[in-house]
Image (tube, coloured by chain):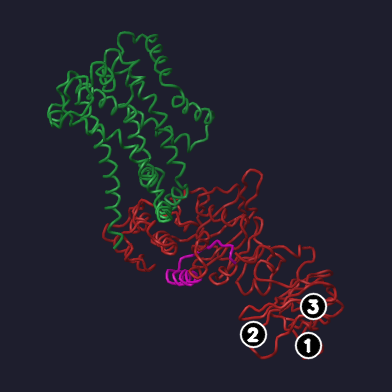
Amino acid sequence: MVEQAGGLSGGGADLQIQGVTKRFGDFVAVDDLHLQVPEGAFFALLGASGCGKTTTLRMVAGLERPTAGRILLGGDDITDLKPYRRPVNTVFQSYALFPHLSVEDNVAFGLRRQGKVSKGELRTKVGEMLELVELQQYAARRPAQLSGGQQQRVALARALINRPRVLLLDEPLGALDLKLRRAMQLELKRIQTDVGITFIHVTHDQEEAMTMADTIAVMNAGVIEQMGAPEELYGHPRSTFVANFLGQSNLISGVVKSKQGDEFLTEVLGTTVRASKVTSRDLEGDVWVGVRPEKVILQRPGEGRQEELNRLSGGRVSDVSFVGVSTQYLVRMASGQELMAFEQNTGERRPFAVGDDVDLTWLAEHTFLLDARQDVRAGAELGDGE
Amino acid sequence: MSAIRNWLGAHGVMLFGLLVLAYLCTPIVVVVLMSFNDPASRLGYDFDGFTLDNWTSICDPYQMCSSVGKSIQIGLMATGLATLLGSLMAFAMVRHHFRGRSTSNVLIFLPMASPEIVLGSSLLALFVNAGFAGQLGFWTIFIAHVMFCLSFVVITVKARLAGLDPRLEQAAADLYATEWQTFWRVTFPLVVPGIVAAALLSFSLSFDDFIITNLTSGQTVTFPMYVWGAAQRGVPMQVNVIGTIMFVLALSMVVGGSVLRRVREAPARG
């Protein structure tokens, strides 16, 4: 179930989590987790609340002790090190800025404790860091006198100034409003590229994870469901949880009939649907045949017949919602299942209306197959919204 | 008619608040006024004329200034010990889970909940049985005051500690502060306002106490006991001077504290 991100080098400053388990009483928060984060990566741990992602982060920071397993940083075992002995810093969820210290002193805190730099050097470094997060003119203020976004940047500067080998971010944008969050996502991405430090970002916001991270690990119930680049996870989900949690998916019951060249032939609702081997797991028998709603093109019955397209006929539009850039259709099939199709509002053609008969068409390379034993609704309620 | 009702609607709460404030402050105003009183007779409490004599001859009434000195001495010492012990107890009770923690919590409340007269008489019995009979005085008062101040300190500091975000200490540890540095750089500065409040409360409780002190004092005379004794013969006007000074001291501490806070935060407003 777990894939390795990047090479199996094992050296450098890679962070390795080896078979880590964390129990709180009877509750297993993290279950035999294996993970390797390559040096310099922007890595996202994505999952709904309670999936174990924050616990994982706290174990890396040293604020929680694993029940079993080891954590290595650049080959050194840091499992039992105190938090202040680890070259790891954290941006806390609610920032945890020291309310009795000025912005300047908050940022200087880590360097002062390490006592390795002279006073002059400290001043220069704090100045540089405040410049990086664009807060020079607020140096003398107390945290309570700053806005949420500014506090967020102080928290980031306070952690980054120590040049940790790994920076941990625990839902750092959760308290910001949507617009500010979007701006900060780009900002964080820029800073990460500038400083080149490994970022591990914990979030429940799939869009945020996809926007920022090079590699995403989707966590569910204490284990990693799937790990990979955002495009890979979105295009080739390997479980119903990932298919539903990361964006939305149409999952239709089908049966694998045969393999032909680089494609699987499946039977879905009485017609043959082709699925690319690249995007699908090698499965036999009952499967979920999946396609993303924006990959589906609606056609009038019989219209635009092309050999290379998968086509499900006999649908009727049951709901149309206009959301500006696109129109989202719900299509009821003869089986009673409702499928989604999102269409860009390019103005190329007249939109469909409720009650129109339509065919659903899409490419074989946009089809993915999932194990039919998995819960078709897994992750669906969690993926949307917040 | 409706104009009056409108005015009352807009200012009614304010008016009521001012009335309550006036009610609270009247006794203090009387004390300040009386400190400038020139009474016609020793037993009279009327304001007969203005004079500064009371202020220039504070220590004239026999034993009064020595009783004030004793009260301040006991107050400072009892406050010091009660604040130290009480703060340590508060840390233990908030931060550590030990056997008997909830029992300790209840026991801490007992001295506050018991009538002082009962506490005082039992303490007297205890001191006498322990062989302090004939030696009652400064030290027995000190022990008694530490005892009842302790509860107030524990409760005040506990409240402050409980409101302290545990993530601040985690953040300090994450930023390379050892346990010792975390305590002195983060925990202690954030709890200090609670400790200072507890100390001020202790001092005024100790300075003010009459009932327990009276039962455990032997021959020693504190300021409240002096006033009580003097009241039988007519309270000298200098008592009001002491009262006024205490009031001004307390007021300037409060005002000074908030001015200091403003000044410290002022440059940030630019």
Mark 3 neighbour class, 10 Å CA radius: few under 14, some 14 to 19, many 20 or more: many
Q: Chain of mark 3?
A: A
Residue B160 x %, y %: 42, 41
What whole-number distance in Å separates the C-alpha atoms at marks 1 and 3?
Answer: 26 Å
The C terminus of chain B - image quarter = bottom left
Rendered red, the chain in question is A
Q: Amino acid at mark 3?
A: Phe
User: Hue of chain B?
Assistant: green
Quadrant for residue A243, please give it. bottom right
In the picture, the disc for residue A345 is 2
Mark 2 neighbour class, 10 Å CA radius: few under 14, some 14 to 19, many 20 or more: some
Q: Amino acid at mark 2?
A: Asn
Q: Are marks 1 and 3 in contact (CB under 8 Å)?
A: no
Q: Is residue A131 visible?
A: yes
A170 lies above or below B237: below
In the picture, the disc for residue A300 is 1
| Magenta highlight on residue A194 | yes
Q: Chain of mark 1?
A: A
Left or right: where does residue A98 sit relative to residue A25?
left
Residue at the spot 22% in from the left edge and 22% down from the top edge: B44
Residue at the spot 22% in from the left edge and 29% down from the top edge: B240
Q: Amino acid at mark 1?
A: Arg
Left or right: where does residue A374 sit relative to residue A68?
right
Span highlighted in magenta in the image: A182-205
| Element class at badge 1 | loop
Residue B231 x %, y %: 26, 19
Q: Nearer the viewer, residue A80 or B17?
A: B17
Left or right: where does residue B49 sit relative to residue A269?
left
Mark 1 and mark 2 lie on one chain; the one further toward the N terminus is: 1
B112 lies above or below A10: above
Residue to which mark 3 is pinned: A264
